[in-house]
Image: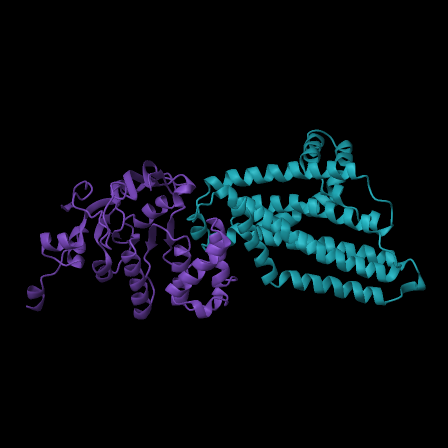
Amino acid sequence: MARMNAPVSQDSRSPAANPAGGSITARAAEPILRIENLCVEYRAAGSRSPAKRAVDGLNLSVNPGEVFGFLGPNGAGKTTTMNVLLGFINATSGDAYIFGTTVRQPIARQRIGYLPELTYYYKFLTAEELLRFYARIFKIPRTETDRRIDEVLKLVELEHARKRQIKTYSKGMQQRVGLAQALINDPDLLILDEPTSGLDPIGRMKVREIIQRLKTEGKTVFFSSHELGEVETVCDRVAILDQGRLKLVGRVSDLAKQYQLSLEQLFLKVVGYSIPDPARTQA
Amino acid sequence: MSTTLAIASIVIKDLYRRKDFYVLFVLTALITLVMGSVHLFHDDRIVRYLKELCLLLIWVCSLVIAITTTARQIPMERESRTIFPLLAKPVTRTQVILGKFLGCWLACAITLLVFYLFFGIAAMSKEHQWPLANYFQAMVLHWTMLGVVVALALLGSLVFSAASSNTTICFVAVAFILLLGRHLDQVAMQVRQPASGILEVIFFAIPHLEFFDLRDLVVHDWPPVSWWVCFEAMAYAAAYAAFFLVAACLLFRRKALN
């Protein structure tokens, strides 16, 4: 059951379900991603001001096969949480686990794919060279690498541009090459940081299609977004974060039923934004 | 190891897709060929000056390539934010530092190979002899010296946030060591304490890059140095490079990425 404005435990009815309809094994029911009492504090370098708590006691888990939307206004602590998950920063206290391994260990990242908000790649490389580089890091054998490169470039529709340097790509193409690199190791968990940010409607639609396709393949997707309509379409469950604290977590359909609000209205309510009454506004 | 090599391969690709190397090589070749085509003072031994000039240009160019390529690696990764997708893979920060070091050092090896090949051909066309052992020894020690410079520049790239300031400071430090390093102990004897003590400490602390300079041997066709001495010099360089790399790894582990 979803809860608001209280320390939120894992939704008891959260689906460990395989969306493709497969049977659920006991092992598969274990959360792929687990965040336990996570706190992250920042202190400006050389500043005497008290540390700012970016994430405050966050508890969350994501089950295999689900698409999980991680929502919150700017500065809520979403990116900080993702940074901890990806090992970019260390938590002040608490811990996070991916596949049961603490995120402090680089091996925890062997089975994940990450797409940053903006495209950050070696622009002097071609898409094929970039994917081959990342495949080498994952120690994927050469023949398997060739097959995976063909597969992911086909998936993101970049086969025609595989030999071109990334600096010649449009923004949409760069975002798709980002998605291709996130998929090169056939990850079980995808962490996407605002994957459709800055894309045109066609680009967004394509990224959305890819996420839905991955969902049907049984992949777990953990993504942050400000596009609530998109989140409503593709996510099984969502969590709303505000000022570093988890305000709400639950299944999208359950939340809609429980609060009789759209996800956008619910989001605004949770973050403390008063929704103007349309009737009163018209009057 | 494969992760380190993969990161190194990206550094090498970056080098040969940029124009710096080609510009410096063409410049060196042009100056050497123009100087070689002029028969100054009708002196048959003029080829020595030509070799000296060419080797000086090779040393300057190799330092430019080594320092500028290394100094921009980590700042470029952070500025273009390519460090994030990289560290989101099963890669440790130590592997990033080692990969960058190896990439820059191997890039220097490729550069030296091309430059020394050109030097050998240019010298042979004038002297009609090719003292391979001398050239090989000079190149190997030159490359070893660049290992220390690369490790120093990599450490500098973590201390100074801007690549340009790191580049400048590295050039000044390397020039100081190469030009004045060997004389510091003599200067120390001529000044009073505490300046004398400070100079002594500096003399023993700095890596003496001039140990690796065999240009005179090549220019005057002296016999090669004993390989045992070369190995000692290599061990000396390895110790300094290892020290700088350990410091760089420790610094990078604590460094915020943005």
Query: Would you identify the image quadrant in which residue B210 lies?
Result: top right
Depth order, front residue of B179/A210: A210
**What residue is drawn where x is 6% and y is 65%?**
A279
Question: Residue B228's spot in the image, x, y percent?
Answer: 78, 36
Question: Residue B7's spot in the image, x, y percent?
Answer: 53, 50
Depth order, front residue of A132/A230: A132
Give the colour scheme of this rendering: by chain
Depth order, front residue of B50/A25: A25
Task: Note whether residue B240 is visible.
Answer: yes
Task: Note whether residue B168 is visible.
Answer: no
Question: Residue B206's spot in the image, x, y percent?
Answer: 67, 38
Depth order, front residue of A200/B159: A200
Q: Is residue A101 left or right of residue B9?
A: left
> What number of labels is visible?
0
- Chain seen in purple: A
Q: Residue furthest front?
A: A23
Is B38 located above or below residue A232 in the figure? below
Is A282 located above or below residue A145 in the figure? below
Q: Looking at the rendering, in which quadrant would you find the N terminus of chain B?
A: top right
What color does chain B have in the rendering?
cyan
Question: Residue A208's spot in the image, x, y percent?
Answer: 29, 63
